[in-house]
Image (cartoon, rainbow, N blue to C red):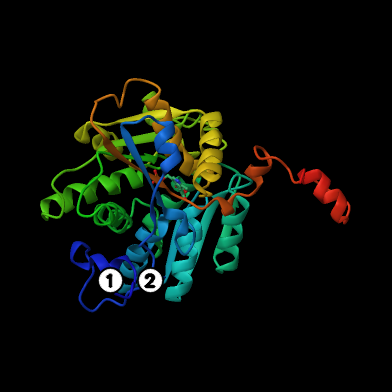
Amino acid sequence: MVWRGVIDKYRKYLPIGRNAEVVTLNEGNTPLVHATKISREVGSNLDVYLKYEGSHPTGSFKDRGMTVAVTKAVEEGCKATICASTGNTSASAAAYSARAGIKSIVIIPKGRIALGKRAQAMIYGALVIEIEGNFDDALRIVREIGEKYPVTIVNSINPYRLQGQKTGAFEVCDQLGGKAPDYHALPVGNAGNITAYWMGYPEYKAAGKVPSTPVMLGFQAEGAAPIVRGHPIQNPETVATAIRIGNPASWKQAVNAANESGGLITAVTDEEILTAQKMIASLEGIFCEPASAASVAGILKLSRTSYFNSGEKKTVVCTLTGNGLKDPNIVERQAQAPTILPADTQKVVEFIGL
Ligand code: AN7
């Protein structure tokens, strides 16, 4: 079957009109990879799979929601989209808006988004505004503009975004052969994705596609963990700039996802995030961005407690939300720099130790 994106594949679960002109980049159908070595690392009773959302057209999971949000925006006659972003939403909004032939306005925190993401919004032709503030300031401005002016907000407060993102859960179930995992782990920033997955799994169960739903595990960065602390964080800080968010829009829904599924939302440190990022790359061959690695950092952390000690073998899916290539600067901080040698074969051979 030819793959034509998540609306084509899961249309009956999505609020898309019969005559809608679908705006797609053939997103979805991302790899679900068994993580052999990380499974070993977390102990014998866990089978860990990585859902690599970094392989999307704009390099993050945001494309699942953006195809639906922009398709609806066009259907409703909108001429411009607007979003606040830590980088991935803006990259995706800019790309899908370009595809639809409508204007894209993106508001990002100055100096605090990864290089590749900033470049994406620019090359797709968005009107890029950097504010002297953080993501939460940017989202406040976007909400205020959206209330007064004829622009469509494509942050996850737009309900169509979450509708599209829930297809991530459908795909995981399909890829596991008609089963939901026992646990689903993911990073939490603005908390839209965990909310969307927790819409998707119960919906797929209700449709008779899977017999069960997973326990949802959400992980925030220690310095940007408002849900864990129980109050908004004024100046969130983390190396994982994608989830540097102090007042998540889908806060209540995320707590609800954790509670209803019997799961939890907890924090991981920047050091744990970077260690996990390195492990995922060097042990499994997948380069994800730091925020994505919070999911794996989280299950590594829980596996060191008695959390997973149930005896029987359990399946865990970790969503790797974005591509590591977006944030190359971070690698300089944690991987060994290349060795510089003269252009001399003998010297190279000696250095390698052959
Ligand atoms: C790689 O792009 O909020 O909890 O503005 O880029 O659904 O917000 C990005 C979030 C995880 C958190 N991983 O997801 C934005 C933005 C990556 C991300 C998250 C984001 P949500």
Q: Amino acid at mark 1?
A: Asp
Task: Work out whether 269 lies above or below 189.
Answer: above
Q: Amino acid at mark 2?
A: Thr
Dot 1: element = helix
**Furthest-front residue in this view:** 354
Give the left or right position of residue 339, taking residue 271 as reference: right
Residue occupying image coordinates x 53% and y 38%: 279
Is residue 53 visible in the rendered image? The answer is yes
Asked whether the beta carbons under mark 1 and mark 2 sit within 8 Å of each other, the answer is yes
Task: Work out whether 173 lies above or below 57.
Answer: above
Q: Nearer the viewer, residue 267 or 255?
A: 267
Dot 2: element = loop
Residue under circle 1?
8
Task: Work out whether 243 lies above or below 64.
Answer: above
Q: Residues within 10 Å of mark 1 (few under 14, many from 20)?
A: few
How far is the residue under mark 1 from the one under mark 2? 9 Å
Is residue 136 visible in the rendered image? The answer is no
Image quadrant occupied by the N terminus: bottom left
Residue 309 location, x and y as percent?
Answer: 28, 24
Residue 132 in which image quadrant: top right
Residue under circle 2?
24
Task: Work out whether 276 lies above or below 170.
Answer: above
Residue occupying image coordinates x 34% and y 63%: 69
Is ligand 1 less than 8 Å from the beta carbon at label 2? no
User: If you read the primary sequence from the N terminus, does the residue marked by circle 1 or circle 2 appear first?
Assistant: 1
Q: Nearer the viewer, residue 260 or 72?
A: 260
Q: Nearer the viewer, residue 51 or 59?
A: 51
Give the left or right position of residue 239, taking residue 3 as reference: right
